[in-house]
Amino acid sequence: MKWITREHPKIDRIACPWLIKRFIDPDAEIIYVPFDQVILKAKELNATPFDLPDVEYTHYDDQCTFDYFLKKHHLKDAALNRIALIVRGADTDRHDFAPQASGLSAIFMGLSQNIKDDHELLELGMKIYDGLYTWAKYLYQEKHTQAPAEQLLLEVYHKYLKQANIKKAPEWANELKEMIQDQVDTNMSLSLQQVSEELEINPAYLSREFSKYFENLTFGDYIRKMRIEKAIHFMQATNYSLTEIAYLTGFSDQSHFNRIFKKQMGENPSAYKKAMQKSKKDTNS
């Protein structure tokens, strides 16, 4: 299958071809042409256009084309989700989305300046994203700085210095945090519409601003994260069945719970619970 987009790629137009060739269509042909020729050439070559306005594969809301590929092709992979956050941050200049976003942006801005042949740049980009995927799959929790002095300095930075640079949250964000915290002891049934009515804030504005004050997550993703954290607490502290835990944490059924848990944690809840119980048993023996 042929895929076509604008010439002179940097972020999304390198990341998406990598995703296509590695997870969707290994034999895909990627075509780069001038912006004003993309639609015309797409019809001539029977190619699917991507990453430009008014086509299916493009940006939606605060998400970029890479995000849409994941959604459209049902790619459920925690490592790809981690990469998506980095790509989104780099491609939209929201480097606060992921600490790696600014590095990715800097690398490809420099490479695009040095390499004028788009396919030569893509070939190198494929290797870079292969490395990024390996990191996101297996190594994302490892730290390069292992020395005690370096670790201590990092802790001071994150605990004190970094906090001083964080933009003060507006009053509505503080109220919303309290509302969500109150729901932790119930079944987490808050909806965006309910919250906007309670705070007397336009839901579109709330949806747009929410991620700035809640871990760079959308409202729905943040609530799901809170539900999963509560579910893990139940697994550790109670003997509830997974079906009971799904109900208590606000999921519509255990199937829904299993799907969201695996997306967030990389494995299904039964496997996670079994590993947790084994770890606890080994610790006590």
Image: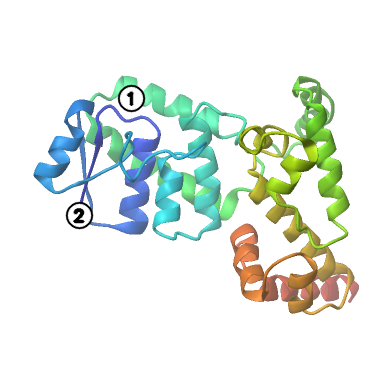
Of 37 and 27, nearer the camera is 37
Q: Is residue 130 above or below residue 161?
A: below
The coloring applied to the image is: rainbow
Q: Quadrant of the C terminus?
A: bottom right
Seen at 54% across and 28% down, the residue is: 102
Of 85 and 280, nearer the camera is 85
Element under label 1?
A: helix
Q: Which residue corresponds to mark 1?
A: 112
Element under label 2?
A: loop
Q: Is residue 13 above or below residue 264?
A: above
Seen at 33% across and 58% down, the residue is: 24
Seen at 83% across and 31% down, the residue is: 159
Q: Quadrant of the N terminus?
A: bottom left
Identify which amino acid the numbered label 2 is placed on.
Answer: Met
Of 143 and 132, nearer the camera is 132
Residue 42 seen from this side: yes
Q: Position of residue 169 (x, y in %)?
A: 78, 27
Which numbered marker is on residue 1? 2
Seen at 39% across and 58% down, the residue is: 73
Q: Position of residue 145 (x, y in %)?
A: 69, 36
Total marks drawn? 2
Local packing at callout 2 (Cα closer than 10 Å; few below 14, some 14-19, many 20+) is few
Choose top left, top right, bottom left or bottom right for residue 268: bottom right
- Residue furthest to the left in view is 44
Mark 2 to mark 1 CA distance (whole Å): 26 Å
Choose top left, top right, bottom left or bottom right for residue 240: bottom right
Residue 104 seen from this side: no
